[in-house]
Amino acid sequence: MSDLKDRIDELAALMAEFGLVEAKLSGDDWAVEFSRRRPQMTAAPGEAAVEGDDVSFPLMMAPPLVAPPAGTPVASPMMGIFYMASSPGAQPFVREGDAVIAGQVVGLIEAMKVFNEITATASGTVEKIVATNGQLVQPGDVLMYIG
């Protein structure tokens, strides 16, 4: 049982370290899933709250819709750590506003101790860099937009 507790503690630490919202740990005949909720808003004095049996819940407003940046997304092809430069202290491959050509290296993803080059999928200007240096990214996560 303490082995399972150690694994769960390790998974919780990894979730915190990499800012993960969900994680799953499984064995031969068991599985544990974790899901971290966003902080809940509480009703301030004078705000409307929905009343429950002995519990008061704040009335949650939907966040305003924000249009994604225009341009072609450059998405992560794999899970790994995204890096904007070839080494610590080096200049980033690209910055917002830089002109790029299709096939130009715009970042690196480290996966299993291997650094994989991420290239621009289109020619244009780097409109918005979404991912941050050192961020854990998943397949399909948008790293940047090229317009």
Image (spheres, grey):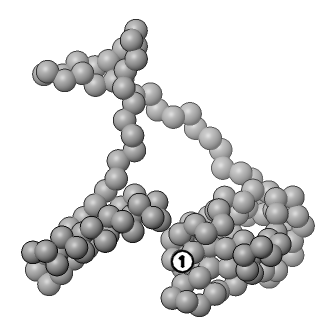
Residue pictured at 59% horizontal, 90% vertical: 114
Looking at the picture, does residue 23 appear above or below residue 28?
above
Q: What quarter of the picture does the N terminus occupy?
A: bottom left
Amino acid type shown at disc 1: Gly
User: Where is residue 123 drawn, in percent x and y?
Assistant: 85, 71
The picture quadrant where one finds residue 103 is bottom right
* Label total for image: 1
The part of the image, by quadrant, that contains residue 73 is bottom right
Q: Residue furthest right?
A: 99
Q: Position of residue 105 (x, y in %)?
A: 78, 80
State whether residue 121 appears in this view. no
Q: Mark 1 = which residue?
A: 80
Q: Is residue 114 above or below residue 21?
A: below
Q: Is residue 86 toward the left or the right of residue 11 in the image?
A: right
Query: Is 24 located above or below residue 35 in the figure?
Result: below
Q: Report x, y in % for residue 66.
A: 62, 41
On-image quarter of the C terminus: bottom right
